[in-house]
């Protein structure tokens, strides 16, 4: 079956901004279908460009590969549709908010440690002391 508008992997990479090795990896794990070949070259269609763009945007938003797989399944007419996408997005939002809270705590510890280093009042290293304190608290 001839593919009209078929492109090679380099062009797919250029159009989507996705690394060639990443494209091959997505094929191996089933996020992208295995393309037809023209001789020894992979040959991609317009749908592949759109699908890879979808995957890349979802990854940029921090969705895991399994979440992207689920979103792709829902995007192509899976049962439940919008309600399932909303549930997945809500769970992801909870994770993002938890990471933001962790980053804010990290920022406070680092800010305090850098200020203490700048003040030079502690004979040791305030940053290493803070890291040790955080480690002792988590154990």
Image (spheres, helix red, strand yellow):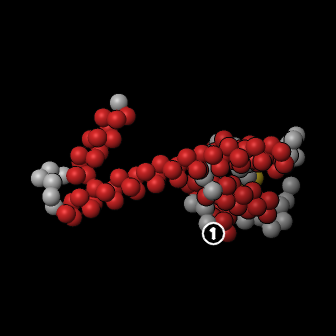
Q: Is residue 89 left or right of residue 127?
A: right
Q: Position of residue 85 (x, y in %)?
A: 78, 47
The answer to whether residue 43 is above or below residue 71 is below
| Foreground residue among 69 and 4 | 69
Q: Quadrant of the C terminus?
A: top left
Q: Quadrant of residue 22?
A: bottom right
Answer whether residue 45 is visible to the viewer in this image: no
| Crowd around label 1: few <14 · some 14–19 · many ≥20 (10 Å) | few
| Foreground residue among 21 and 78 | 78
Picture residue at 43% right of the left edge, 51% below the top = 105
Q: Position of residue 74 (x, y in %)?
A: 81, 46
Q: Position of residue 76 (x, y in %)?
A: 84, 49
| Foreground residue among 39 and 11 | 11
The answer to whether residue 36 is above or below residue 16 is above
| Foreground residue among 112 and 15 | 112
Answer whether residue 91 is visible to the viewer in this image: yes
Query: Which residue extends farthest top?
Result: 139
Picture residue at 35% right of the left edge, 52% below the top = 109
Q: Is residue 110 left or right of residue 21?
A: left
The answer to whether residue 7 is above or below residue 139 is below
Q: Position of residue 107 (x, y in %)?
A: 40, 56
Picture residue at 18% right of the left edge, 52% below the top = 125
Q: Quadrant of residue 10?
A: bottom right
Tell me the SS state at disc 1. helix
Picture residue at 28% right of the left edge, 56% below the top = 113
Q: Which residue is mark 1?
A: 14
């Amino acid at each position: 079956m001839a593919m009209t508008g078929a492109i090679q992997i380099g062009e797919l990479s250029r159009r989507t901004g996705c690394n060639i090795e990443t494209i091959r990896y997505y094929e191996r794990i089933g996020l992208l279908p295995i393309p037809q070949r023209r001789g020894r070259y992979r040959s991609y269609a317009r749908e592949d460009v759109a699908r890879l763009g979808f995957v890349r945007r979802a990854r940029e938003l921090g969705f895991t590969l399994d979440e992207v797989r689920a979103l792709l399944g829902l995007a192509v007419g899976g049962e439940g549709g919008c309600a399932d996408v909303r549930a997945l997005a809500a769970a992801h939002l909870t994770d993002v908010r938890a990471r933001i809270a962790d980053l804010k705590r990290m920022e406070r510890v680092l800010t305090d440690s850098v200020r203490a280093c700048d003040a030079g009042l502690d004979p040791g290293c305030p940053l290493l002391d803070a890291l040790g304190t955080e480690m002792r608290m988590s154990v």
